[in-house]
Image (cartoon, rainbow, N blue to C red):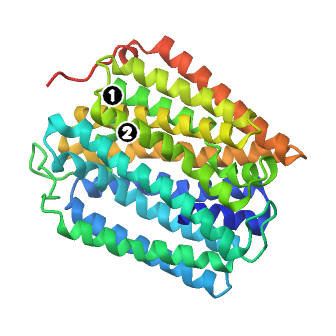
Amino acid sequence: MQSTAAHWHIYLLTQSPVALGALGLVRVLPIVFFSLLGGVLADRYDRRRLMLLTQAFMGVVAGALALRTLAGHDSVWLLYATYALLGAASAFDNPARQSLVPRLVPTPDLPAAITLNLTAMQAAQIGGPAFAGFLIAHLTGSAGAHPAADSRALGWIYGANALSFLGVVLALATIRASGVVAAPPSGQHEGLIASAREGLRFVFRTPLLVWTMGLDFVATFFSGALSLLPIVADRVLGVGAVGYGWLVAAPAAGALVGSLFTSVRALPRRQGRVLLWAVGGYGVATIVFGLSRSFPLTFLALALTGLADLISTVIRQTLRQLLTPDALRGRMTSVTMIFFMGGPQLGEMEAGLVAGIFASQVVGVTVSIVSGGVLTTLAVILVAMRSRALRDYEPPAA
């Protein structure tokens, strides 16, 4: 809900695709700077306690944004500062979070656990944006194609997000599994720099990690155009804030369908090929999204991007966890996080810059989205030709 409101908020304040894309940039820069440190800490300290600290901090930041917006002191720079702080917190939170998951279930159940985790996330990403769109329309009076400039009411959405962190902290406090990291073979911790280097060496000397990480970055960088959805909803389709909320929820709806399917039917053994087909389908669906002038077709294309992304995410996350020892999982996640989180955020900036080149916003948005889909599809073809290890990958039988 907060992400949906923040993008609409920036659109109200600036009407600029570049300003919308910059929100991704200010979020990803702290991730690039702090993620390696976050990975080292996740491999040294109790991961559950580390998450308690990061989630509490993010709740305070969200609360500050809500209070400032409700008081009428909102600005683009306030939103950028908020997302920079949230990005910095996620650089420490995400390595601890992903490293903790294999501790919660037996190894054979890990793919199902990752799928269930993604199912819960996708359900929230369906309901959250749709409900946020409804609230934006009724709180700000922007149900039509040209929203009103009053953005103060968006503070109520930010406040709801701040309160939701209480539930997150309570859930973490009741987890019984240990968050203590398995001791490294030597029983001794290296210095921070040496420990970070060890994580980097492990990732970049494991070809499957390199290929999946690079493909994920390229696909999300070129096809990361969701930040342009306020313009698509307002100028291209004319569906206003309510339609915008549904468009934001569309990828999650497709992903939810995919997660339900993969939870009852195992993926084929030749998962490398499934991954390549999924990312290729993501690129093709993005092209359709960019060319569409129909709300139902746009919704369907976005849903297909979510479905394809879900399938590739399950394969990538399971592969990474199975290949990585527990004592290195935090650092592995921190390195890959630069790519799987940096790709979408930098892609938003790239999409905004390309769209901003053209005098017509409609033409600029179309060119930005379609070109991203084409480049993603070409990247998949190139990787399929170059990497036999990825093309023929099969998960361990046990």
Q: Position of residue 36 (x, y in %)?
A: 38, 51
Q: Image check: 280 left or right of 398?
A: right
Q: Quadrant of residue 315?
A: top left
Q: CA distance from mark 1 to mark 2?
A: 31 Å
* Callouts 1 and 2 close, C-beta under 8 Å: no
Disc 1 is placed on an element classified as loop
Q: Which residue is mark 2?
A: 259
Residue 395, labelled with which disc? Answer: none
* Residue at 61%, 84% in the rendered image: 70
Viewer can see residue 339: no
Name which residue type carries label 1. Arg
Residue drawn at the location 66% of the way across and 40% of the way down: 296
Q: Residue 265 occupies which quadrant of the picture? A: top left
Task: Report whether residue 252 is seen.
Answer: yes
Query: In the displayed structure, does residue 185 sit left or right of residue 295?
Result: left
From the top left corner, tell me how far across and down residue 312 is, in percent.
42, 32
Which residue, given by chain and number where applicable, does mark 1 sit on? 205
Position of 250 with respect to 109 (left or right) is: right
As shown in the figure, which amino acid type bears the numbered disc 2? Ser
Q: Position of residue 393 (x, y in %)?
A: 32, 18
